[in-house]
Image: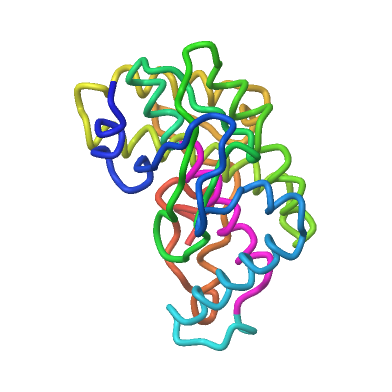
Amino acid sequence: MTLDQVVALGPFYAHEQHLSGTAPAAPWRAMSELLDDPAVLEDRVMATRAYLAAAGGQDPDAVEVRVAASITHLGLVARLVSPALATAVLDAGVPPLDLEAVYWQPVLGGAFPLSLAPPSKSRDLATEVFEGPFPALNQATERFSVSDHILRGNVASAINGASIALTNAAPQLADRATEMAARLLAHPTVREAHTTADGTFRRRSCCLIYRAAPNHAGALCGDCALAGDR
């Protein structure tokens, strides 16, 4: 497996690599700053709030902070789980997801630049995901009045979305991607955050992005718990 194979899968899988135990030069920043300095996560949430408001032609005050925080959280976990799932599916091991070993450039709009240490087959994907950054990111985001129910739904949605996008990009990897995602989705952390009735994934919560649109009338995501209720 080469890094190029992962990068070719799409922007949420694309990343750079730095040597283990080293810090890439600026403008790279350690993602652990999101946990170490509350102001960093707050700045990210407020920037996301302004971005969402501008997309709807609104003043930032029109978008609830909890909505921006949920979308910020979903973007962070999706960006982290996607390359980790891809390297595992390609049987190349798993990169460390400890945020002290992960570097980013916090730009807005789509997949932000990400740098990971090389993957290793000695690491377990579920352990890296559920004992790594996600519990801490969930806890840090709760202070913006985002419920744990929504945050666990975000994690489940990110896992499922990464599997679907990988399958679309590389159909030959579909079986393995689906199998590995299913194992993650069966983990106690997210097992109750979604359903898979009739083979269709649906989260049991809403990420709240529809509320960022004027009059809270935005579109729902395809896996939303509210789909079919509107």
Relative to 165, say whether 206 is above or below.
Answer: below
Q: Residue at x 79, y 58 (%)?
A: 143
Image-quadrant location for residue 162: top left
List x then y, in percent, for residue 75: 51, 53
- Position of residue 6 measured from the top left corner of the image (x, y, whole percent): 30, 33
User: Residue 188: which quarter of the image?
Assistant: top right
In the rendered view, would you say 183 is above or below 102?
Answer: above
Count of numbered badges drawn on the protein? 0
| Relative to 18, residue 181 above or below | above
Relative side of 59 to 167, left or right: right
Predominant secondary structure, magenta span: helix
- Residue drawn at 32 percent across, 48 percent down: 11
Question: In screen coordinates, is 79 left or right of 61?
Answer: left
Q: Give percent across and percent down for residue 174.
A: 27, 24
Q: How is the image coloured?
A: rainbow
Residue 69 is covered by the magenta coloring: yes
Front residue of this view, candidates 150 and 81:
81
Residue at image location 38% in from the left, 25% down from the top: 87
Q: Does the stretch in magenta take in 59? A: no
Q: Is residue 209 left or right of residue 162?
A: right
Q: Residue at x 50, y 59 (%)?
A: 27
Q: Specify the farthest residue to the top.
A: 122
Image position, residue 205 (x, y; %): 60, 48
- Position of residue 48 relative to residue 136, above or below, is below
Q: Quadrant of the N terminus?
A: top left
User: In the displayed structure, does residue 145 sit left or right of residue 199?
Assistant: right
Q: Which residues are magenta?
A: 63-81
Please state which of residues 110 and 40 is positioned toward the viewer in this rendering: 40
